[in-house]
Amino acid sequence: MYRNFIFASCLALAGMLAGCQKAATPAETSNTDSVSQKNAVVETIMERRSIRKYKPQAIEKEKLDEIIRCGIYAPNGMGRESWEVRFVTRPELLARIDTLYADYMEKTQGKRPAAAAYGAPAVAFIAYDTTYDLSQVDCGLLGGNMLLAAKSMGIGSCCLGGICRFLNAPEGAEIMKELDFPETYKLLYAIAFGYPDESPKAKERTPEKVRLIQ
């Protein structure tokens, strides 16, 4: 009987605590920190960082498939899906890109970087449709979905621009031929993906650049 009394008392106490939690004030429940703690999407956005150091571990195919699926379900103008994406995971091709990129950088800027995509085991190359004036917006939205999907699975990422300057130059023609984009498409940017081997801190943002007009 004593055990039953203790058990009943614990249940009553738990109910009281739950009631106290439900009685929180609107100010407390609308707090930004409270929102980010309860909303997995907000948490993922706020915790994502650009990763420039990766573990050699390959990304599982099912996770790559999910990242791709999330990307192509991004909003896109008039349902055009005006993007073309090549997801490269073949080590030999990534190594060849590194070598040719290093040659290009040495020739044009006098420096020879170690890796074009920071040694990431997977790189997505995203091209836009030059016949559609808002295709670059579609490609940006696709990439944003991919970045967040990857983060939600513990996979790091980093947007890459320099590698695309090289690939769009005559020196990159050999690789571009292998990527095989349609004739009307042009490479816009790339994204490196891999398991992070660093934990960088967030950089400060400038909220004043956004104005609420009401």
Image (cartoon, helix red, strand yellow):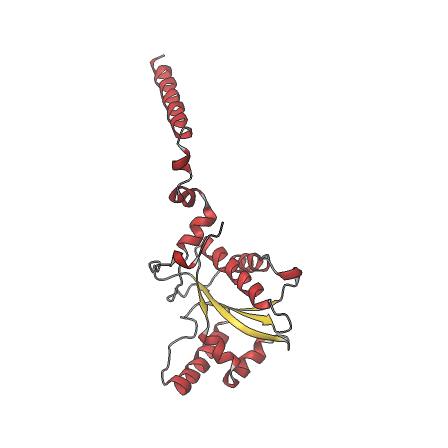
Does any portion of residue 116 appear in the rendered image?
yes
Q: Position of residue 144 (x, y in %)?
A: 50, 60
Q: Residue furthest front?
A: 214
Along the viewing direction, whichever of 103 and 4 lies nearer the viewer: 103
Where does residue 32 sit, x and y in percent of width and height?
A: 40, 44
Give the answer, above or below, for where 46 lies relative to 196: above
- Res 92 seen here: no
Question: Residue 18 at what x, y percent from top left?
Answer: 40, 27
Name which residue lies at 51% across and 79% down: 167
- Looking at the image, residue 101 sits to the left or right of residue 179; the answer is left
Quadrant for residue 49, please give it.
Answer: bottom left
Q: Quadrant of the N terminus?
A: top left
Q: Position of residue 130 (x, y in %)?
A: 61, 74
Vertical order, 181 against 28 (above or below): below
Question: Total number of numbered labels?
Answer: 0
Residue placed furthest toward the bottom: 107
Q: Nearer the viewer, residue 154 or 61?
A: 154
